[in-house]
């Protein structure tokens, strides 16, 4: 059955206010809940946070008081939604456990988007970032074992493999090499626009999370690892946000944001395994349908166009969190040694990349390598998932030892 969010009015704003009791949602049980329920919560918090940031940015550039009032009104309810979503995360989970879930989101959400992306260049951009988040999961899993003496596989429930990816030490590039070629707003598939907003939002919230929780860590190695990977997340946000056509009007961007929120809530409503959380996704979808109608009206009034001109006539296939082991392994086998040069991808360590590496590491190896050494010194081997067959990265690292010190 097709679903076109532009055809549904949803819940009007004057019926969206929730009380403090209603916002005081019961968190999920970290020991009993589906890891992908936790992933959906984290992903949806990123989508809501991006919508709020965008609305604030729009308001700061808008001179029309009527529009600013409408943005403020919708933004208030977006904030209530964000609080209900993010407060579903359990306070019992440590920051490091939540971090590992953040990276599981990055791996499996980016894998899904890359698999579904119709544009070859955009797909390459997602696959490139995927291999880096995959390695971040491996580094944090080792930090988790070192500090909390627990296995990360319990958190990801064997759904997501924990293995080396493109080594984090190789992620540090010159800033100009993090910019990509944007899609063309007039010719790009509506699905491509949704994908770009989704992954940009997910990476942005990860960047912000690490920026804030990193200095709260007590262990020096944890502080250093969060700092290093937080800098990579800055690269990722630059990488993904540059995919969005900078020529889109504010009204186009507003409609795309609201449409994407509808898409993600609809997707998670359709795929959620927990009935209680599913009901929250359904409620928020109906709220977002109301927000989309407001954005659509503003676009008609101020941009002189109908939102149907830029939006898909029906929602795409629902976004689904599911295992991507074989897909990730195949991407690893083909692309582990890629880096970027300008807006493209190359397999050679070019001069600008080499100079950046030398400048950053003139005082020694970064924390991403140190944490592996510490775990190996403590346990005799670094932590990774129990393999169910030879991992392609091992052969590649044997052939290219300069990619990693492991």
Image (spheres, helix red, strand yellow):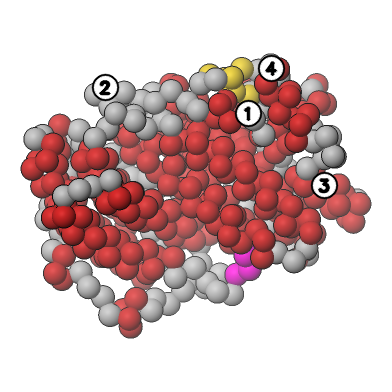
For residue 370, which numbered disc appears in the image? 3
**Which residue sits at x=63%, y=28%?**
174
Tell me the element at label 3.
helix
Q: Is residue 312 visible from the viewing direction of this image?
A: no
Which residue in the protein does label 4 denote? 350
Q: Are marks 2 and 4 in contact (CB under 8 Å)?
A: no
Toward the viewer: 138 or 328? 138
Tell me the element at label 1.
loop
Residue mark closest to the camera, 3 vs 4: 4
> Disc 1 and disc 4: Cα gap in Å?
11 Å
Earlier-in-chain disc, 3 versus 1: 1
> Disc 3 and disc 4: Cα gap in Å?
25 Å
Q: Quadrant of the C terminus?
A: top right
Earlier-in-chain disc, 2 versus 4: 2
For residue 174, which numbered disc appears in the image? 1
Earlier-in-chain disc, 2 versus 3: 2
Tell me the element at label 4.
loop
Residue mark closest to the camera, 3 vs 1: 1
Toward the viewer: 225 or 72? 72
Mark 1 closeness class: few <14, some 14–19, many ≥20 residues within 10 Å: some
> Disc 2 and disc 3: Cα gap in Å?
46 Å
Earlier-in-chain disc, 1 versus 4: 1
Highlighted magenta segment, given as a residue range: 93-97
Q: Is residue 399 visible from the viewing direction of this image?
A: yes
The x, y position of residue 52, in whole percent, is 34, 55
Is 371 included in the stretch rendered in magenta?
no
The x, y position of residue 342, in whole percent, is 55, 20
For residue 187, which numbered disc appears in the image? 2
Mark 2 closeness class: few <14, some 14–19, many ≥20 residues within 10 Å: few
Earlier-in-chain disc, 2 versus 1: 1
């Amino acid at each position: 059955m097709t679903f076109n969010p532009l055809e549904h009015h949803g819940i009007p704003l004057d019926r969206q206010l929730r009380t403090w009791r209603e916002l005081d949602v019961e968190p999920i049980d970290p020991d009993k809940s589906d890891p992908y329920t936790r992933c959906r919560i984290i992903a949806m918090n990123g989508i809501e946070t991006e919508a709020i940031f965008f609305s604030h940015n729009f308001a700061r550039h808008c001179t029309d008081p009527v529009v600013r009032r409408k943005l403020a009104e919708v933004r208030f309810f977006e904030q209530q939604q964000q609080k209900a979503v993010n407060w579903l995360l359990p306070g019992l989970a440590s920051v490091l456990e939540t971090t590992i879930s953040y990276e599981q989101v990055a791996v499996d959400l980016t894998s899904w988007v890359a698999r579904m992306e119709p544009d070859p260049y955009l797909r390459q951009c997602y696959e490139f970032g995927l291999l880096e988040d995959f390695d971040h999961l491996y580094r944090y899993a080792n930090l988790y074992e070192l500090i909390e003496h627990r296995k990360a596989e319990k958190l990801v429930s064997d759904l997501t493999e924990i293995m080396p990816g493109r080594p984090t030490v190789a992620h540090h590039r010159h800033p100009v090499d993090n910019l990509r070629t944007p899609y063309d707003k007039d010719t790009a598939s509506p699905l491509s626009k949704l994908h770009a907003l989704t992954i940009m939002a997910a990476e942005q919230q990860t960047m912000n999370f690490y920026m804030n929780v990193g200095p709260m860590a007590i262990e020096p190695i944890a502080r250093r690892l969060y700092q290093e990977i937080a800098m990579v997340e800055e690269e990722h946000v630059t990488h993904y946000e540059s995919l969005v056509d900078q020529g889109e009007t504010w009204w186009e961007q507003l409609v795309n944001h609201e449409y994407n929120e509808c898409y993600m809530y609809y997707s998670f409503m359709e795929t959620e395994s927990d009935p209680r959380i599913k009901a929250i996704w359904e409620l928020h979808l109906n709220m977002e349908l109301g927000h989309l109608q407001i954005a659509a009206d503003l676009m008609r009034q101020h941009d002189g166009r109908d939102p149907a001109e830029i939006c898909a006539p029906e929602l795409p296939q629902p976004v689904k969190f599911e295992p991507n082991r074989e897909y990730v392994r195949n991407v690893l086998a083909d692309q582990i040694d890629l880096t970027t040069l300008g807006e493209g991808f190359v397999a050679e360590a070019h001069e600008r990349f080499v100079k950046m590496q030398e400048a950053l590491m003139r005082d020694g190896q970064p924390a991403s390598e140190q944490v592996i050494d510490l775990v190996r010194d403590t346990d005799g081997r670094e932590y990774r998932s129990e393999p169910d067959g030879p991992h392609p990265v091992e052969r590649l690292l044997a052939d290219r030892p300069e990619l990693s010190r492991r």
